[in-house]
Image (cartoon, rainbow, N blue to C red):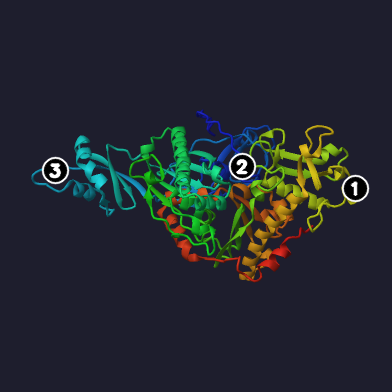
Amino acid sequence: TAEDGTEVAPAQRGVRVPPGVTVFDAASWNGIAIDSTCGGHGTCHKCRIRVTSEVEVPLTRHDVRTFTADQLSAGWRLGCLLHATRDLAVDVPPLTTRPKAATVGIGRQVILRPALQKRYVELAEPSLSDQRTDLVRLTDAIDDLELTADLHVLRRLATVLRQADFKVTAVVLDEALVDVEAGDTTAFRYAIAFDLGTTTVVGTLLDVGTGTPLAVASSLNAQQPFGGDVITRISATMMDPAALGRLQQAAGATLADLARRVCREAGVEPTDVYEVAVAGNATMTALVLGIDPEPLGVAPFVMAAAEPPDVLASEIGLDLHPRARAFFFPALGAYVGGDIVAGMLATGMDRDKRTRLFIDVGTNCEIVLSDGETLLSTAAPAGPAFEGGAIRCGMRAADGAIEVVKVDPHAEDPDAAVTLGVIGDVEPRGLCGSGLVDAVAELVRVGLLDASGRLVPEEEAKGVAPALADRLARVGEERVFVLHRPGPGVDPAECVYLSQRDVRELQFAKAAISTGWSLLLAELGLEHRDVQQVLLAGSFGSYLSPASAVRIGLVPRLPVLRIVAAGNVAGEGAKMALLSVRERAGALALLEEVTYVELSDRPDFNDAFVEQLAFGR
Ligand code: FES
């Protein structure tokens, strides 16, 4: 229901979002537009939403100024000031204004200047006294653009002009006239932003005329059977010459399926989609373009090109407008790819004067540090622990995965001493990356894991955390901490547990990452406390508990309020590139502005790594 009481057709959507993000960001990341002219900074008072769950929601002074007492008690709040800290049902009113700017990424206001433009023109018909060519007749009518036309347009031009009585819409991408359409089709201008991840691929259909996201879909990358990470996929191409073609085809099929789904969901004709932007790491970009990725996988880790050329969307398997174009984000290095460049765009890493650290946590962890002047980046090989790989009870973040762990060492009832948050609210089946980080952080906090990462002996455990001590058990020779026991007396091997070896895996992963950012801080002569904001990005990083990330030393020791879940910033950057040519140019400029720091050949790397292995209390 709109604020004025108008009934609108509800579109029910359930989305999972990182804890603590604002309702405004959560909605926008999930393709639901909320009115705003300030970009989520609490000043425009337009982002009005209504909380319909029966829960107490906090009130800010801005809410009090914006709403009447009746509206406040009916649940109206400003969406950019309301943080999602638990399940919430929210009504989002339809947009009231036609936006000139869109809010994308982390509070970025993007003035709409898409490469895709449509111009409706009514042309004078040719006569013996006006024998201008069809092309000149059209381009004369659009005199603010220098247009060039390709053969595809020339083949259609004469027929379309005459069939449509010279009332046509010119379709322009940058300065290229890519089509002429009969009548006025200016309302139909769509593009798709893709985040081409190694594991998950997300597509967002955008109306580039308004900046509004219309539909979002995600799926697993169909390259999965070739291996879970980039190295195994590169290896597949090295072992079998046919694998590159199959990997290319699988990536293209994933993108094509998402394109079909978002168009269907929004009721948009695929032929009205004229452009796509793809943000992927260097390996995913090479594979979808059919470029041999082998040099990316072996030292000295060289890319074919930092800046892939624009290609036709049809060349990567997409069935959209026949002249639709695909823009690929450039990469800074073999392991700091286009997804990170897109993420830097979405978080404004190059514009903000604050000292900020951007960490995309994953098998390969990318790190960017800015002190407001200098931008440094690096990549840290964290291994598969965060994806649930190499963890005894590890699994991807799917239904049944434990994602939150809280322990109370003094609970009266030992069963209540461990509280678990499980995705899908079902029986726990395993532990995903954020659950792993939480479990270790909690055990460090209560003293069941010592600074070296060792599970303390049972006797000692009884002293520090009596309610938890009997969860220490053995599976084979290995010591474990039982997180979930399906029934009384069930053998620990059948339970969901954290093993001593899992702790070691996480320790190595976090040490790799913290070595990365601590060496970047040292490069700029900065200390932990100088960092004003840490952005945890990516499908894994965004779901990490900031407190647990601090506790285990994955991020610098800072107040948790300085640690922000940034969400799927690669996809947000891809949207920005479609909505603004200036932002797209900004992404290309990052290639010059960011210095890549190679960690692997640094003499101080090993010492720093060893130093970072321990857990602080
Ligand atoms: Fe402007 Fe919330 S978006 S106040």
Asked if disc 3 is less than 8 Å from ligand 1, the answer is: no
> SS at mark 2?
loop
Q: Is the residue marked by circle 3 packed among few (<14), some (14-19), or many (20+) residues within 10 Å?
A: few
User: In the drawing, what numbered circle is on residue 462?
Assistant: 1
The mark nearer the N terminus, 1 or 2, is 2
Which residue type carries mark 3? Answer: Pro
Residue 421 is tagged as none
Q: Which mark is residue 126?
A: 3
Q: Is residue 461 left or right of residue 357?
A: right
Could you say which is closer to the camera, residue 235 or residue 528?
A: 235
Q: Give the x, y percent position of residue 313.
A: 39, 45
For the residues bearing labels 1 and 2, Cβ distance under 8 angstroms? no
> Which one is earlier in the sequence, the residue at label 3 or at label 1?
3
Please state, as top left, top right, bottom left or bottom right, where the N terminus lies in the image. Answer: top right
Q: Nearer the viewer, mark 3 or mark 1?
A: 1
Residue at point 49%, 65% (across, down): 593
At 82% from the left edge and 38% from the top edge, which residue is drawn? 416
Q: Would residue 19 be visible to someone looking at this image?
A: yes
The residues tagged by marks 3 and 1 sit, at their Cα atoms, a distance apart of 94 Å
Q: Nearer the viewer, mark 2 or mark 3?
A: 2
Instruction: State the residue position of label 2.
Output: 17
For marks 2 and 3, the one nearer the N-term is: 2
Please name the residue shown 86% across and 39% down the image: 414
Q: Secondary structure at mark 3?
A: loop
